[in-house]
């Protein structure tokens, strides 16, 4: 288990995540507003008292404010950063009024408001697409290699060698597709379609609700089929590999070692590690033909869990869990869009499960938890940190699109009502709705902050 980063690292990483994401969100509003000729009085990262800033030649005050938990663009015609409509515009010349937000056509106002969440969504797409373009796409055959202890899939009738083709009606082409349809549905029964001996069978599987921990000790519950997909296929060799020296090749599938069947790559260590230097007989399938290889195991010194040095046997092979397929720019972009919508879908699922009692409200997190995770991901390297930033970015997009007055989604709801009624809601109704929405958001913020504090070790979390 990796130690948690220190407080300064968490604060730095938190600001490094949230600052640029808020900046990008507000730039979305600002740039589309500017496109439609709306004047911006202020562009703020954070709320409250101004810490630093400057005024550009267009009269926009760009500033950094004391509370770095959001930001705003105050357009001409707004009476406050929440974009509540101003009741008074007296004193403005016709030319000045033409550059205010509220005189713009409905579709332009809606696009200006929508631009903030859309920019956060597009940032997530761009990051995920870049990862796909650089790293390629992992393709791993969803064939059942083995079952874990108390496997719900095995209890439901799945067998070794079955190939999963669909889960709950969703097509499965690779092992990487499986988590999307299982992780968030612990305890639920889902139909799993498998191919077996040329037939397609559909078996109902009640997913296990398994608790897992990451390297920092953070725990969460996930839905689990209880299947090991790591078929014992050789994906490569390392060091002075005894297996390679004996004639085995990448792509060979090990079926037995000294007469003991091997069903999963996870079976190999217990048949190899206790016997350093011993000659074993390995049977492997190659091009549909069984071949036998006598292999003298290597001897490697390692440090055991008790801190003592011990010698173990080694074949010098790597698991052949799938293969990486390079992707072009267009496919990478498609993957980025698809994965971003998939993440949004899991957010909707998570919220629904909290409201229906399938998930605990303790899973909701606020700024303290985000800061904690930011520091942890930062300590793992830039890839992990940027991937985490993509996740937070799409979270910002999703939250801001909720139809809560005071958020972007609330304003879009007002515009939808205006479109239907053919006239806007009166100023008093909007004002009360925004006050109610802001109170709701502040209450939620207080709740998740308390949630974060209770989860800290000092409070027994």
Image (tube, rainbow, N blue to C red):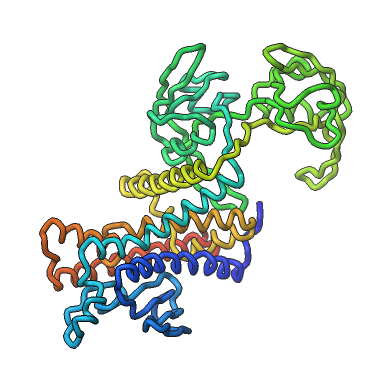
Q: Nearer the viewer, residue 94 or 85?
A: 94
User: Which residue occupies the extreme bottom position in the image?
Assistant: 91
Q: In front: 279, or 79? A: 79
Q: How many marks?
A: 0
Please, which residue is most extreme toward the front here?
95
Residue drawn at x 35%, y 45% as measured from the top left: 353
Q: Position of residue 376 (x, y in %)?
A: 59, 59
Name, please, the residue furthest toward the right.
Answer: 277
Is 375 on the left-hand or right-hand side of 68?
Answer: right
At 40% from the left edge and 31% from the top edge, which residue is drawn? 170
Q: Residue at x 40, y 62 (%)?
A: 448
Q: Quadrant of residue 419?
A: bottom left
Give percent across and percent down for residue 198: 49, 12
Residue 417, quarter of picture:
bottom left
Q: Judge whether 458 appears above or below 358 on screen.
A: below
Name which residue lies at 15% across and 61% down.
418
Q: Position of residue 217 (x, y in %)?
A: 59, 52
């Amino acid at each position: 288990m990796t130690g948690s980063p220190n407080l300064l690292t968490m604060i730095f990483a938190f600001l490094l995540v949230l600052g640029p994401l808020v900046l990008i969100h507000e730039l979305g509003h600002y740039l589309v507003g500017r496109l439609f000729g709306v004047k911006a009085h202020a562009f703020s990262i954070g709320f409250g008292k101004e810490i630093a800033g400057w005024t550009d030649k267009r009269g926009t005050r760009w500033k950094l404010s004391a509370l770095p938990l959001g930001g705003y663009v105050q357009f001409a015609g707004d009476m406050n950063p929440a974009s509540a409509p101003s009741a008074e515009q007296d004193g403005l010349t016709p030319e000045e009024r033409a550059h205010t937000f509220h005189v713009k056509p409905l579709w332009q106002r809606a696009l200006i408001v929508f631009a903030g969440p859309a920019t956060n969504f597009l940032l997530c797409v761009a990051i995920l697409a870049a990862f796909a373009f650089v790293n390629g796409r992992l393709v791993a055959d969803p064939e059942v290699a083995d079952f874990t202890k108390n496997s719900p899939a095995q209890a439901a009738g799945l067998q070794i060698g079955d190939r999963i083709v669909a889960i709950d009606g969703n097509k499965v082409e690779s092992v990487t597709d499986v988590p999307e349809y299982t992780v968030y549905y612990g305890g639920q029964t889902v139909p799993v379609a498998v191919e077996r001996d040329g037939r397609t069978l559909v078996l109902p599987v009640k997913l296990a609700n398994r608790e897992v921990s990451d390297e920092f000790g953070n725990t969460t519950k996930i839905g689990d089929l209880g299947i090991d997909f790591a078929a014992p296929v050789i994906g490569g060799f390392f060091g002075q590999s005894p297996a390679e020296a004996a004639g085995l090749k990448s792509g060979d599938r090990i079926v037995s070692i000294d007469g003991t069947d091997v069903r999963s790559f996870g079976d190999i260590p217990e048949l190899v590690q206790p016997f350093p230097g011993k000659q074993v007989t390995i049977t492997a399938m190659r091009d549909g033909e069984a071949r036998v290889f006598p292999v003298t195991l290597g001897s490697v010194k390692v440090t055991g869990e008790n801190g003592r040095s011990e010698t173990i046997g080694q074949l010098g092979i790597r698991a052949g869990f799938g293969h990486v397929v390079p992707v072009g720019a267009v496919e990478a972009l498609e993957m980025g869009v698809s994965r971003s919508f998939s993440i949004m879908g899991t957010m909707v699922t998570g919220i629904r499960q909290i409201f229906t009692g399938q998930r605990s409200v303790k899973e909701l997190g606020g700024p303290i938890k985000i800061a904690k995770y930011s520091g942890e991901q930062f300590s793992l390297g830039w890839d992990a940190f940027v991937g985490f930033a993509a996740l937070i970015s799409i979270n910002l997009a999703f939250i801001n699109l909720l139809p809560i007055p005071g958020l972007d989604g609330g304003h879009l709801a007002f515009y939808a009502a205006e479109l239907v009624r053919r006239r806007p809601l009166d100023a008093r109704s909007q004002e009360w709705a925004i006050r109610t929405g802001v109170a709701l958001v502040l209450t939620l913020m207080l709740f998740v902050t308390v949630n974060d504090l209770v989860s800290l070790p000092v409070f027994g979390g």
